[in-house]
Image (cartoon, rainbow, N blue to C red):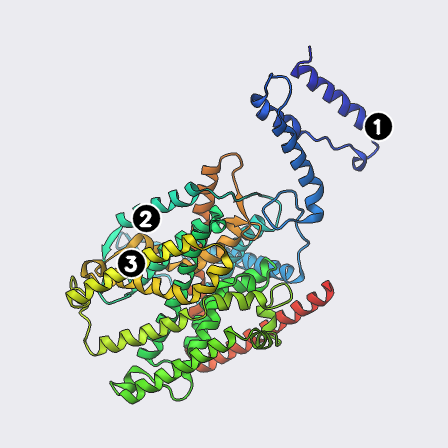
């Protein structure tokens, strides 16, 4: 009889013979041991208990081909057995910088600890009490920068190990309806459970917008990890959520400039720094182009468009207009000019590509050697930022004229009008869902998406804000995630998903539920810490004093020029 014990003995004898005469390690024979493990898992599917099923052979062949072929083919999904790429020059420089930051932070900690020991308070013999130590002085800006760089260096090391080294496994995504809808039900229940009263009851107040960002970001994360992009109705609804983020960009920045009238360089630098800091660091550490993190370039460009549109002469603000129809008409003409420019670029791909193919813009917006991907992303939601600006203008004008009732518990509009608008909003929601389910191809849906997405966004705003009781409460659970929504969106690329979002990171093999729980906990903690680091550095690196700010900008310009030069040299070397 051929038993498992005899098979193991035969294998050991064969291995000893094959490798017994080997003079060095390079000539040793590699044994494909995984087939035995596969057999142990699939023998229960055997018909007679002796011969292995077909699935055993297919799985063994798949793994063998992965081992032999993936290092050459380099598939774009989360397949195994791909050796890590050699680090680029920028990655080596980043490693050196973060290494020095960590070493400097450790030295600073030891110096402070030694100084603290030497300055311990002595016991006052006469009073019989210990003298109280003087309160510790707050950390100076240079120490805060050093500590932030140290923490960021440790976080970036984790990013690199997760998605560039071969330390952790990756697995592919397989979509099922339960893998997408079940987690969404869980988070909705949690969100409803953590209800609190808002500090103010205005339309789209701070708590409400943070809540909006939070639940949208959680849904988008579930969409990405479940691979739901293959299911067209879900894909179209997620496209509306992305458009809603851009709508908030138009609404929020227009409202700030219109009310505050602050067009100074400090505000611009603060916003650009907060939006782009993490992405720029990841571009260097992970060796990816800026356009790879497409949403951040999209929001950045739209912010600059809003700023330029409103900052150009004549600068029209709420204080300047002060109810004057002339100035309101002037602002509407500015918005109309912006809409004309958007339409021109949307239907003139050649002009769009010529603008963004100019150096140095090309270095920021090229993907695989061209800017088509950037044009496609921009064109997909081309009108929604304009709609956000127009909505903000109309809403603030109505608010100024005291047309709206924004008191606690009060309906936003008269009862009849409120009921009609709520009915229309609900019908538009249902109509869009029916249309998204009947749409046949992504190309067909994407063509109509720019025109119909704003209807869904406005319907949500009306449903959320017309009833006074709905406007007076918010979910603190969703709002907490909304405060770090940008970091969550960016960090998912490498430390929650893997293989540049095409796979799923596996920290704990063999236990999917425990793995996703642990990786999600680390992912959220990292995103929260990066948000704090970004805020701390923004306060220090972007000072309010004009002279100091221009010096910092000159240093940053030199840094980015060197970075673009290194990128150009590397690109030429690759060609």
213 up-or-down from 70: above or below: below
Q: Is residue 179 above or below residue 427?
A: above
> Residue drawn 65% across and 37% down?
62
Label 1, secondary structure: give it: loop
Where is residue 22, by image quadrant? top right
The span from disc 3 to disc 1 (Cα, nearest Å) is 79 Å
| First of labels 3, 1 by sequence position | 1
User: Viewed as shown, does residue 381 lie left or right of 13?
Assistant: left
The percent position of residue 298, horizontal first and vertical second, equals 48, 67
Q: Which residue is mark 3?
A: 427
| In this rendering, the label closer to the viewer, 1 or 2 | 2
Q: Residue beneath label 2, please?
A: 188
The x, y position of residue 494, in whole percent, is 53, 52
Q: Earlier in the sequence, mark 3 or mark 2?
A: 2
Answer above or below: position of 58 versus 432: above
Q: Judge the density around disc 1: few (<14), some (14-19), many (≥20) Cα neighbours within 10 Å.
A: few
Q: Is residue 258 left or right of residue 547?
A: left
Quadrant for the N terminus in the image: top right
Q: Residues within 10 Å of mark 3 (few under 14, many from 20)?
A: few
User: Is residue 215 at least partly visible in the picture?
Assistant: yes
Q: Which residue is mark 1?
A: 21
């Amino acid at each position: 009889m051929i038993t498992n014990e005899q098979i193991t003995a035969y294998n050991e004898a064969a291995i000893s013979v094959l490798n017994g005469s080997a003079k060095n390690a390079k000539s040793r024979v590699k044994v494909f041991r995984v087939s035995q493990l596969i057999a142990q898992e699939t023998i229960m599917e055997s018909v007679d208990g002796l011969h292995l099923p077909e699935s055993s052979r297919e799985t063994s062949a798949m793994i063998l081909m992965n081992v032999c072929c993936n290092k050459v083919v380099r598939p774009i999904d989360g397949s195994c057995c791909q050796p890590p790429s050699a680090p680029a020059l920028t990655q080596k420089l980043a490693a050196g910088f973060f290494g020095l930051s960590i070493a400097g932070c450790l030295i600073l900690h030891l110096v402070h600890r030694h100084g603290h020991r030497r300055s311990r308070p002595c016991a006052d013999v006469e009073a019989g009490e210990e003298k109280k130590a003087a309160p510790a002085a707050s950390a100076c800006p240079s120490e805060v920068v050093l500590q932030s760089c140290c923490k960021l260096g440790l976080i970036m090391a984790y990013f690199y190990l997760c998605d560039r080294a071969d330390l952790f496994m990756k697995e592919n995504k397989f979509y099922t309806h339960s893998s997408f809808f079940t987690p969404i039900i869980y988070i909705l229940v949690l969100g409803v459970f953590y209800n609190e009263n808002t500090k103010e009851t205005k339309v789209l107040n701070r708590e409400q917008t943070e809540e909006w960002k939070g639940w949208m970001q959680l849904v988008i994360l579930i969409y990405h990890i479940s691979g739901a992009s293959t299911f067209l109705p879900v894909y179209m609804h997620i496209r509306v959520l992305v458009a809603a983020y851009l709508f908030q960009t138009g609404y929020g920045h227009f409202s700030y400039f219109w009310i505050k009238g602050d067009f100074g360089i400090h505000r611009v630098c603060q916003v650009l720094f907060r939006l782009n800091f993490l992405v720029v660091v990841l571009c260097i550490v992970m060796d990816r182009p800026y356009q790879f993190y497409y949403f951040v370039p999209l929001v950045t460009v739209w912010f600059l468009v809003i700023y330029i549109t409103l900052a150009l002469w004549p600068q029209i603000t709420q204080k300047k207009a002060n109810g004057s129809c002339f100035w309101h008409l002037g602002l509407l003409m500015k918005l109309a000019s912006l809409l004309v420019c958007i339409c021109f670029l949307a239907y003139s791909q050649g002009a769009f590509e010529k603008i963004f193919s100019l150096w140095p813009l090309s270095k920021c917006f090229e993907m695989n050697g061209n800017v088509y991907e950037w044009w496609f992303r921009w064109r997909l939601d081309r009108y929604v930022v304009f709609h956000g600006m127009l909505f903000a203008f109309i809403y603030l004008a109505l608010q100024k004229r005291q047309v709206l009732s924004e008191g606690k518990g009060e309906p936003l509009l008269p009862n009849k009008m409120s009921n009609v608008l709520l009915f229309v909003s609900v019908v538009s929601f249902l109509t869009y869902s029916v249309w998204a389910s009947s749409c046949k191809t992504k190309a067909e849906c994407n063509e109509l998406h720019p025109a119909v997405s704003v209807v869904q966004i406005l319907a949500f705003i009306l449903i959320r804000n017309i009833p006074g009781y709905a406007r007076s409460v918010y979910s603190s659970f969703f709002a907490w995630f909304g405060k770090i929504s940008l970091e969550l969106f960016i960090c998912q690329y490498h430390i929650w998903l893997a293989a540049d979002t095409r796979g799923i990171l596996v920290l704990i093999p063999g236990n999917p539920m425990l793995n996703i729980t642990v990786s999600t906990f680390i992912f959220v903690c990292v995103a929260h810490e990066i948000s704090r680091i970004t805020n701390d550095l923004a306060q220090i690196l972007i000072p309010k004093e004009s002279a100091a700010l221009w010096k910092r900008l000159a240093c940053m310009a030199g840094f980015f020029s060197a970075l673009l030069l290194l990128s150009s040299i590397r690109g030429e070397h690759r060609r």
